[in-house]
Amino acid sequence: MRTLFHGTDRLFATTDKSFEVVECAECRLLRLFPMPDPEELHQYYPPGYWFTPGSDVASRSEEFYRRLVLSDHVQFVEKAIAGAGGQGPVLDVGCGGGLFLRLLRERGHQVLGFDFSLDAAATAWRRNRVPAICGNFSRPPFAGGSVPVVTMFHVLEHLLDPVSYVEAAHKVLRPNGRLVIQVPNASSWQFLLFGQNWNGIDIPRHLVNFKERDLISLVESCGFVVERRKHFSLRDNPAGMASSIAVSLDPMGRRVRGIPETPGLRLLKDAVFFGLVLTCLPFTLVEAACRAGSTIMIEARKKE
């Protein structure tokens, strides 16, 4: 392997420990080195890592924004639901606070959340009225062939063993079931532009950094056929670039770090960040049109 660069936790400042991002000389896969053990990794996920809005103006504005930018995720998954036959629950692995599933449920779909974090699953239940289970999906508590659609948004890059989650999805999906995956794209223009400061690297929480071909190779080796690819996410691509440029303005980063802010100052910083997101939008649309967007989302069909 060869070392590409060194970095530490820019977003949440959970540690001052330095890590390397290395590239395998044979397969060219990028990963974190040294790889943290599970106990150490737990320390890098502070409370409130998922979105839990409050009742103030800034929180309501942030929730409105998140509902708006999740619309393209919802539309992408609805096509996968139709392709799978449309009957049965959408299982969202790594559901966090459950807002995405709430949006699907509001459109008449059956939903079920699954998350490794007990607090996240509880938030999905309490805040968004989404049924959610806490556990390790490499040992899924579902019967084989019982689910039509499984989604994993920004999950695989956090795992010590991402293969086990894709294999588990293959097991629980029905024949012709659909798997929707989104990960940061390490073959994007933003990665080339920002390097270790790219939001998609997210040291030390992202253990594997997928290029598009890595993700395709993974799902195909686990018994799937890729049906669709999408290189743009309204939620992630412009905001990710804005965070790469001005990490100190990232709303979630500020909230998780507990930075003292008056309500007025918080609104001002959110407004400046949103302006930066809008400024980044044209660039992210162009890179996505060139199939080099900072995220890659796929729909894969379980082989018969």
Image (cartoon, helix red, strand yellow):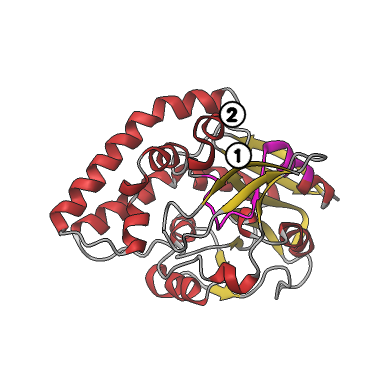
Specify the segment rendered in magenta: 200-217
Q: Which residue is mark 1?
A: 185
Q: Amino acid at mark 2?
A: Ala
**Where is residue 268 drawn, in percent x and y?**
18, 46
Element under label 2? loop
Q: Nearer the viewer, residue 25 or 278?
A: 25
Q: Position of residue 222 (x, y in %)?
A: 82, 52
Q: From what the image shows, is residue 6 above or below residue 123?
A: above
Residue at 65% across / 59% down in the picture? 87
> 207 or 104: which is nearer to us?
207
Mark closer to the chain start, 2 or 1: 1
Q: Is residue 280 above or below residue 206?
A: above
Q: Is residue 78 visible?
A: no
Contact check, label 2 and label 1, Cβ < 8 Å: yes
Q: Amino acid at mark 1?
A: Asn
Q: Nearer the viewer, residue 283 or 189?
A: 189
Query: Spatial distance from mark 2 to mark 1, Cα to Cα?
Result: 8 Å
The percent coordinates of residue 86 (x first, y second) are 64, 53
Outermost residue, right direction? 304
Question: Quadrant of residue 170 in the image?
Answer: bottom right
Whether 236 is among the magenta residues is: no
Q: Is residue 87 above or below residue 193?
A: below
Where is mark 2, residue-wise? 292
**Which image quarter holds the N terminus?**
top right
Q: Is residue 207 magenta?
A: yes
How many discs appear?
2
Question: Could you tell me which secondary element the residue under label 1 belongs to?
Answer: loop
Q: Look at the image and tell me whether residue 55 can be seen.
A: yes
